[in-house]
Image (cartoon, grey):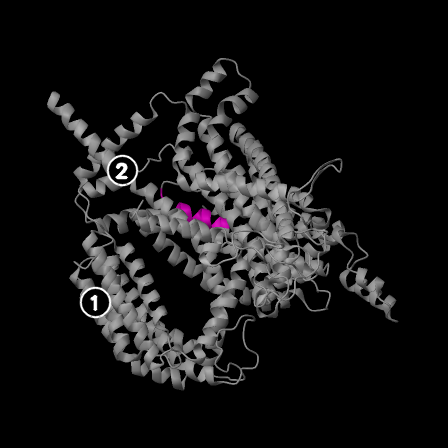
């Protein structure tokens, strides 16, 4: 049944045994090392981290990359968003045009061998290479995510830190200001901002969205500061003559960094969904710029005939958001001091034998 | 307490005032509502411009015009609110009155499903921490968390709705699908119930047999075209419900509660034919409501007559049983309506629609038919919204329950020798619900504000559509009307959440803070 019977005595014994194993594990390690160890033990999170790095590298090197219009790097992909190659006729199923040439089935199993082909993700209505479009859209979405993350994290941390540290009137004013921003649902602010500033480009859109994305974070940071400022090490620093600024940045902030990092990852995964959703309803990134949400919106009607125009942008959105969520989960586990690693049966047995041996020796 | 609420309301009023002022001006500087008119070549262009300017008071600069608008809105306190007129001359309050019920209908069912499903799965994953079920549910909830709603919606339309409609042309489930459904259900139930390897395989086998047999029977008898439960199945399911509800709420050891629930289940089956007579001859919401109240009253009496001590929990259990088994009768009635519904010209055997909020061509005044129509239109949006929002509840309830299970009072409860059921349901689950309640309230307000995308994907015309029209047409009054509703809702929801929190958790005192 769902309610498993547990004997109390057995439970408390295991807890102390687990504690012993867990404590032994972190002996003589710095906080950073403990966190890093715990994070790298979270297999899904590590895998997601690799996926994110891979996607970022893959996507940003695929197309020509211009920095301030001066420095230019050639991408490894043959087409760009501007190129309009000829539409592929003939060899597509069901008389469609511009079907994808990507093939993942090796020749041994009767496929065409692993390879990209001419247009791996197919072509759009006028023949533009869809792979290039998706790469461009993913670049946009990733940059939007990072910009929103950075701006949201900085504003949220500063406001939360100040109101949690100084309390009193400053706190009341800043928290009412936060409430004030919270009042406006994110999607509504997003569409007003996107509608007015979307044509300035994705980065400006991200900048303005970031200005409204910090509210949840600032509340968390405030809560963290409210508890941390009462701790002994803060008193010690104050007695030693440290300034408020020094206490905030050198003593409290490093202790609150776990909460901040975790909630910034969640903020970022929310940001990528917000951006694509806004672009989808037409209030975000607008043409001629490319965004994943925009691509989905444009080709959702083509789903029954040319589903690839719909699948690939969606797959990129999901893999990015999913990876970020898993990284956030791994970080939360890593930073949470109450988190106990799952103790395997083998370790439990070993510790039990060790305890018995110790008792026997006594 | 009253002073606290008043003070909070005052602060909230100021906040609403400020944010609406900013939004008003932001929207006003964004574009000129006359732009399209100025570019047009109609002969009466100047007259149109002049009349729209007069109508929307465009000659007043936006910051001042805001005060004209807020003056109208403040009429709310004297019972005479004036949200102004939209561009098309319709009263904004009128458009809002039409749109609000649509949006609520869209999100209400999805929110309830998401809460019930999310919390149950969250609780089970917490109790089965680090099991295979826990890991797979973690993965599924993260996946749902990362899905864009518009993407899911298109997939649901293409695969679920259209394939199901195609399936109904020839409703025979192929053998492969029977096996797949059986295996899927078997794995699901076996991992939820868990236990030793032997129980796992027993549950697996039983679930597989039951599910695949059921699907085969459904397929062979053409149940999908002409579904229904009938009194015998209703009786069997009600007895099952009585046992299940009693086990979860007070435990099967409580004989009085079990007897009282079983009596209630029996009574609901006796009520089957009279209820169907009422449904057929006097259909309507009022009648359904009256019968529901009758069932609850009966449940209270049954519960009271069976209980000697511990009245509250027994009556509660009986009421839950009564509501659930009464719901079965209503579900049965809807199932009976399914066949006539499919035979209407507007539906023509393709019952799951992909867009819209009702079929305008249905042309039937029958209460059950038109409500079934509304329900079928709700299927896809509800599914999409549920899939996406249930993930949050799974994660949150799992985390909270794990936190609670580590508390000292849980250890105390176990040490007192309480059964595991009492420890989980009475001590742990109730405390888990405290933070969850506040989340739910705030979340519901947020979902209403965020219905914009869902509405646009499924072609509903609710508040999201109004907002979109307001934004695209630079229609300030319309835009601000929608904003006023969503923002006040979110503000009130936050206040309610705070009050609820302090009401549920005596450790938190209202009014100590800001």
Q: Nearer the viewer, residue A241 or A87?
A: A87
Q: Are marks 1 and 2 on the same chain?
A: no
Question: Could you say which quadrant of the image residue B41 lies in?
Answer: bottom right
Q: Chain of mark 1?
A: B
Taking the spot 42% from the left edge, 83% from the top edge, the residue there is B339
Q: Position of residue A98 (x, y in %)?
A: 63, 62
Does the magenta segment cover residue B390? Answer: no
- In magenta segment, residue B502: yes
Q: Going by the image, does A224 lie left or right of B184?
A: right
Above-or-below relation of B310 to A267: below
| Viewport quadrant of the N terminus of chain B | top left
Q: Are marks 1 and 2 in contact (CB under 8 Å)?
A: no
Q: Which residue extends farthest top?
A: A240
Disc 2 is placed on an element classified as loop
The location of residue B433, given as percent across then percent down, is: 36, 50
- In the visual, does B63 lie left or right of A236? right
- In which quarter of the view is residue B275 placed? bottom left
Give B19 or A29, whichever is nearer the viewer.
A29
Q: Which residue is mark 2?
A: A344
Left-right relation of B137 to A346: right
Write down the region rendered in magenta. Answer: B494-506
> Which mark, by number, is residue B260?
1
């Amino acid at each position: 049944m769902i309610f498993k019977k547990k004997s109390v005595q057995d439970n408390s014994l295991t807890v102390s045994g687990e504690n012993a194993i867990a404590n032994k594990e972190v002996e003589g390690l710095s906080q950073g090392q403990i966190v890093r160890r715990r994070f790298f033990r979270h297999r899904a999170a590590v895998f997601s981290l690799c996926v994110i790095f891979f996607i970022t590298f893959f996507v940003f090197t695929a197309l020509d990359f211009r920095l301030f219009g001066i420095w230019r790097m050639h991408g490894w992909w043959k087409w760009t968003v501007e190129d309009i190659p000829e539409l592929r006729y003939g060899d597509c199923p069901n008389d469609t045009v511009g079907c994808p040439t990507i093939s993942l089935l090796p020749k041994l199993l009767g496929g065409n061998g692993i390879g990209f082909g001419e247009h791996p993700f197919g072509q759009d209505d006028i023949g533009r290479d869809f792979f290039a479009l998706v790469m461009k859209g993913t670049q946009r979405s990733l940059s939007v995510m990072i910009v929103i993350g950075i701006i949201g994290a900085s504003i949220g941390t500063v406001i939360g830190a100040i109101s949690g540290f100084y309390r009193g009137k400053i706190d009341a004013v800043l928290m009412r200001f936060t409430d004030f921003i919270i009042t406006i649902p994110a999607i509504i602010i997003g569409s007003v901002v996107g509608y007015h500033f979307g044509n300035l480009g994705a980065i400006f859109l991200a900048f303005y969205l970031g200005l409204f994305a910090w509210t949840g974070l600032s509340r968390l940071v405030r809560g963290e500061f409210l508890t941390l400022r009462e701790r002994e090490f803060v008193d010690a620093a104050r007695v030693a003559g440290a300034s408020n600024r020094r206490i905030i940045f050198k003593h409290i902030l490093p202790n609150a960094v776990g909460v901040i990092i975790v909630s910034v990852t969640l903020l970022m995964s929310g940001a990528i969904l917000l951006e694509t959703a806004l672009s989808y309803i037409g209030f975000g990134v607008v043409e001629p710029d490319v965004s994943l949400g925009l691509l989905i919106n444009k080709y959702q009607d083509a789903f029954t005939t040319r589903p690839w125009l719909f699948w690939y942008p969606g797959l990129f959105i999901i893999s990015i958001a999913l990876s970020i969520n898993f990284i956030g989960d791994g970080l939360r586990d890593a930073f949470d001091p109450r988190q106990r690693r799952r103790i395997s049966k083998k370790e439990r047995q070993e510790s039990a034998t060790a305890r018995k041996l110790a008792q026997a020796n006594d | 307490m009253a002073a606290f609420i008043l003070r909070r309301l005052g602060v909230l009023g100021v906040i609403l005032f400020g944010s609406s002022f900013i939004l008003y001006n932001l929207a006003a500087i964004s574009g000129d509502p006359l732009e399209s008119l100025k570019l047009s070549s109609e002969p009466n262009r100047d007259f149109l411009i002049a009349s729209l300017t007069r109508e929307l008071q465009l000659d007043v600069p936006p910051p001042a015009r805001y005060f004209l608008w807020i003056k109208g809105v403040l009429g709310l306190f004297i019972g005479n609110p004036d949200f102004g007129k939209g561009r098309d001359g319709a009263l904004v309050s009128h458009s809002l009155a039409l749109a609000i019920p649509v949006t609520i209908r869209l999100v209400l069912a999805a929110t309830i499903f998401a809460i019930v499903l999310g919390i149950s799965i969250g609780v089970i994953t917490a109790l089965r921490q680090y099991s295979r079920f826990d890991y797979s549910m973690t993965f599924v909830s993260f996946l749902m968390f990362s899905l864009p709603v518009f993407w899911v919606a298109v997939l649901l339309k293409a695969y679920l709705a259209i394939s199901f409609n195609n399936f109904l042309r020839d409703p025979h489930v192929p053998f492969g699908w029977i096996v797949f459904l059986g295996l899927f259900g078997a794995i699901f139930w076996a991992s939820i119930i868990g236990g030793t390897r032997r129980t796992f395989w027993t549950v697996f086998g039983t679930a597989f047999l039951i599910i695949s047999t059921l699907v085969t029977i459904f397929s062979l008898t053409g149940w999908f075209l002409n579904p229904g439960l009938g009194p015998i199945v209703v009786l069997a399911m009600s007895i099952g419900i009585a046992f299940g509800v009693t086990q979860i709420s007070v435990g099967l050891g409580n004989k009085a509660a079990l007897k009282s629930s079983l009596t209630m289940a029996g009574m609901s089956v006796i009520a089957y034919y009279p209820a169907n007579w009422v449904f057929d001859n006097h259909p309507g919401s009022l009648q359904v409501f009256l019968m529901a109240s009758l069932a609850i009253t009966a449940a209270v009496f049954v519960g009271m007559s069976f209980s000697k001590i511990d009245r509250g929990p027994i009556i509660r259990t009986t009421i839950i049983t009564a509501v659930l088994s009464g719901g079965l009768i209503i579900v049965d009635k809807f199932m009976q309506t399914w066949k006539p519904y499919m035979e209407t010209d507007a539906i023509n055997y393709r019952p799951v629609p992909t867009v819209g909020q009702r079929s305008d061509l249905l042309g039937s005044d029958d209460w059950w038919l038109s409500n079934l129509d509304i329900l079928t239109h709700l299927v896809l949006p509800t599914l999409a919204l549920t899939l996406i929002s249930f993930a949050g509840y799974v994660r949150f309830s799992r985390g909270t329950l794990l936190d609670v299970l580590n508390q000292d009072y849980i250890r105390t409860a176990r040490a007192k020798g309480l059964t595991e059921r009492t420890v989980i349901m009475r001590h742990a689950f109730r405390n888990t619900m405290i933070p969850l309640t506040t989340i739910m309230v705030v979340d519901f307000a947020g979902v209403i504000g965020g219905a914009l995308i869902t509405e646009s994907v499924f072609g509903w015309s609710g508040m999201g559509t109004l907002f979109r029209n307001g934004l695209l047409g630079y229609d300030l009054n319309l835009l601000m009307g929608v904003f006023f509703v969503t923002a006040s809702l979110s503000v009130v929801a936050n206040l309610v959440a705070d009050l609820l929190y302090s009401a549920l958790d005596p450790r938190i005192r209202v009014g100590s803070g800001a």
